[in-house]
Image (cartoon, grey):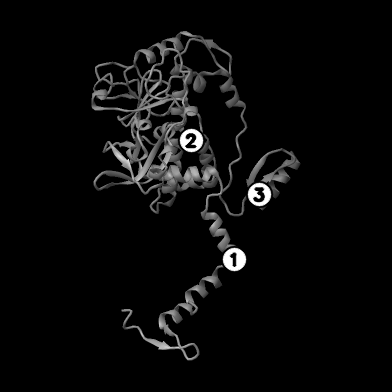
Amino acid sequence: EDSRRKKRLKVDSYEIVDEKDEEDGALDIRDIEFRMTNDAKRIQALISGASTSSGRDLIMLKIVLCRALYPQIAVADEFNHFKSGADQLYHTWSKPFVFLHPTSYFGKNPRVLQLTEGDIQTDAPLGFKSKLPLSAKHQILCYLSLLETTKPYIVNSMRMPAAQTLLLLAHTIDTNIGFTRIVCDSWLLLEFPYPESGLNLLLKAVKLRQRWDALINRRLNDANPNKSVEAELQKNQPRESYEELQHDLSCDISAYMSSEVYYTIKRLLPGDLKVLYYGADETHPSIDPNPFEEKFECRPHDKKGGVYVTDNVVYNCVVDTDWSYNSYQETYALPWTCPDCGISLCFSPLERLQHKQFTCSNRTEKKETETPKPVKDNRPNAKEYKCETCKETLYMTPVEILRHKKSCMVK
């Protein structure tokens, strides 16, 4: 094709010029149309809107990608600190013993994925013994695909905090009675030696997942062209806007992903799974009220034992070890004082959670005296109005504002 293209001699410089070069220098009509329809300010706004302006935006971008790719995650081999960079091993849910691609960033810099001495907690709680490092800096890799050549390689990966990501995205989560041993998707075991640290992190993850799913379902329902009459009436009712809900959710997810909790992480082998669960022969009482999801009806698991407290969380199906059983007994035996109402009783971790959410007298009083938060109106002509007479913040149209002013003056 290059040989058939016409070439001619320049008159002044005696140089051979390709006709394609002259075409490249000509103005493109589509470029002119784009510049006419988009001014500099609009282009700058598009560029700034498409870029991450804060660490929170970056965290949200990574967690959305990770949710789309899950369960394509890889966990480091426990003996990686004894190996060189090229021999670093990782394990995935579908294939163990995979390598970092040698041309990738993590393949060239494997040390950034390893724990340093400062990251490891040396003063473990009394009775907790583990060969695995206790740290708040454990990481997992979320990858796009596996490349099979002479070796299996992880391709296009990004690192994420391990426990926070697993508890937020795992398809199934199994716990022991004290929430100190948590199993994600029946292949990764997280152990939290400090009392209530695992319970608090799991509760945050469950609540965030529920809010995230509710926001997605609301988007889908509003976009559905075949809506019912009830859905239309519900849509017209005043409620928080998508922007407010998304902002609050992104702030809470960012804080959750940055939380510092000490734990160990272990890949479970087939032999571990045989002695991991109680089984369906064990009877477990129902959880009522349910602090994880109040309207969810608890039901026993047919194979693992334990009780479903949400669609994906099974409580009290994981067998306790000596240290986790002793930790639960010590926690149950010590009197616990509620930080809100000051009551002091011997409660289990789950009973403490139930008290905080349902039976705490101080919390009930706060709910009764709490003023409702003004809900932003979705109407285009509605705006925020702070009434100086009644001291209320309302979202109303200009006509409604005038009516409200008159009614306040009469009162």
* Viewer-proximal residue among 130 and 383: 130
Q: Position of residue 291 (x, y in %)?
A: 44, 24
Mark found first going from the N terminus, 1 or 3: 1
| C-beta proximity under 8 Å, tags 1 and 3 | no
Q: Position of residue 240 (x, y in %)?
A: 54, 43
> Residue 316 occupies which quadrant of the picture?
top left
Mark found first going from the N terminus, 3 or 2: 2
290 to the left or right of 336: left
Identify which amino acid the numbered label 1 is placed on: Ala
Residue at the bottom extreme of this rendering? 11
185 to the left or right of 211: left
> From the image, which quarter does the C terminus lie in?
top right
Mark found first going from the N terminus, 1 or 2: 1
Identify which amino acid the numbered label 2 is placed on: Met
- Separation of residues labelled 1 and 3 (CA atoms): 39 Å
Q: Which residue is mark 3?
A: 400
Q: Which residue is mark 2?
A: 257
Residue found 32% across the figure and 36% down from its top: 89
Q: Position of residue 375 (x, y in %)?
A: 58, 42
> From the image, which quarter does the N terminus lie in?
bottom left
- Separation of residues labelled 3 and 2 (CA atoms): 43 Å
Identify which amino acid the numbered label 3 is placed on: Glu
| C-beta proximity under 8 Å, tags 1 and 2 | no
| C-beta proximity under 8 Å, tags 3 and 2 | no
- Separation of residues labelled 1 and 2 (CA atoms): 37 Å
Q: Position of residue 150 (x, y in %)?
A: 24, 46
Q: Which residue is mark 1?
A: 40
